[in-house]
Amino acid sequence: MFRLSFKPIALPAHTLALTLAAGLAAHGAAQAQAQPAVIYDMGGKFDKSFNQAGYEGAERWKKETGKSYIEFEVSNPAQREQAQRRMAQRGADPIVGIGFSQGSSMEKVAKDFPKLKFAVIDAVVKMPNVQSILFKEQEGSFLVGMMAAMASKTGKVGFVGGMDIPLIRRFQCGFEQGAKYANPKVETLANMTGTTPTAWNDPARGAELAKSQFAAGVDVVFAAAGGTGIGVYQAAKDNKKLAIGVDSNQNHVQPGTMLTSMVKRVDVAVYTAFKGVTPGITSLGLKEGGVDIALDEHNAKLVTAEMKKRVDAARADIISGKIKVIDYMANNACK
């Protein structure tokens, strides 16, 4: 694996571009042409959540094929297009962008490099050489909402989101629907961490929000906040409450207090894209194995047989269409 890295904050845009270009040139254009590339968004590839799931997919591809790939971690918004463009100039194919924020820049770059293939996760780019990979987060969130309501002893459950965007509202909307489905009398409290990308990597703020919800009676909290969630999980452990992870299986982060995780298979998306891009929109839900709950040795004592039975039944009903989970981004409403 060839890893690109540079520190962008103190450098002007043209210097950043030259630095990235130099890194690729040093590696050799001929080798890069045979390599796929992945660009992680802000928060880093070891955020224990969204980006890390993508990294694990790339590593799986590397292990199975014995080939290497190029990667880059965005820490400045201007780097998204720069990284995509420089990788394209060196012939990396396909180029996978993780996160909705990479959509607008990918549209520009994909247009300029029509012979290369691109894939973007959580955004729609309508170009003939781009695959847009979306997830039905509301479906997986519905299931963990059910589990939260069934595990709660106070009848109050909470949600901590990262950046306040429609995508995260989709998580919240599904969670609230699932909680109400399991217990019509349940109360839900929700907070968003912020309105800028820093909201994805603020564990201290996540802990503060969780503690305020616990003080209001919440005893199970779901965090859909990237690295910020680490603070939520720590606060749950410290206050002897339960937490629910997101994107990756985070049950191991605080074993014994993690009720479950809403797994979003970004790893599968990256792995599949590396094997071959299929232009158009791909939507992954429960039926496609794109989202689900995580059950393992770390939460086995927390998940009762009744809980699992009801969740399994709901999963089947969602897949069959008997239960219709409202998509906040399609309806701009959550009832």
Image: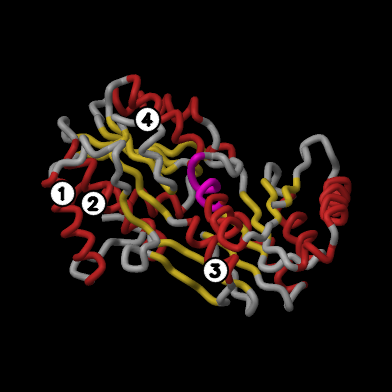
Eye-nearest disc, 2 or 4: 4
Range of residues picked out in magenta: 48-54
Mark 3 and 1 residues: CB-CB less than 8 Å, in contact?
no
The local crowd at label 4, few if under 14, some if 14 to 19, many if 20 or more residues have their Cα within 10 Å, is some
Task: Please indicate whether residue 37 sits to the left or right of residue 91 in the image.
Answer: left
Residue at 73% x, 77% y: name it: 114
The local crowd at label 1, few if under 14, some if 14 to 19, many if 20 or more residues have their Cα within 10 Å, is many
Quote the CA–CA distance across marks 4 and 1.
Answer: 25 Å
Q: What element carries label 3?
A: strand
Which residue in the structure is indicated by mark 4? 254
Which residue in the structure is indicated by mark 1? 182
Quote the CA–CA distance across marks 2 and 4.
Answer: 24 Å
Give the quadrant of the C terminus: bottom left
Which residue in the structure is indicated by mark 2? 178
Residue 237: in magenta span: no
The answer to which of 152 and 286 lies nearer the viewer is 286
Task: Please indicate whether residue 241 sits to the left or right of residue 196 in the image.
Answer: left
Which residue in the structure is indicated by mark 3? 132
The answer to which of 194 and 245 lies nearer the viewer is 245
Q: Quadrant of residue 320?
A: bottom left
Task: Please indicate whether residue 140 sits to the left or right of residue 31 in the image.
Answer: left
Residue 49 x, y percent position in the rendering: 48, 43
Residue 306 x, y percent position in the rendering: 11, 46
Is any atom of residue 189 visible in this view? no
Q: What is the three-letter code of the residue carrying label 1?
A: Ala
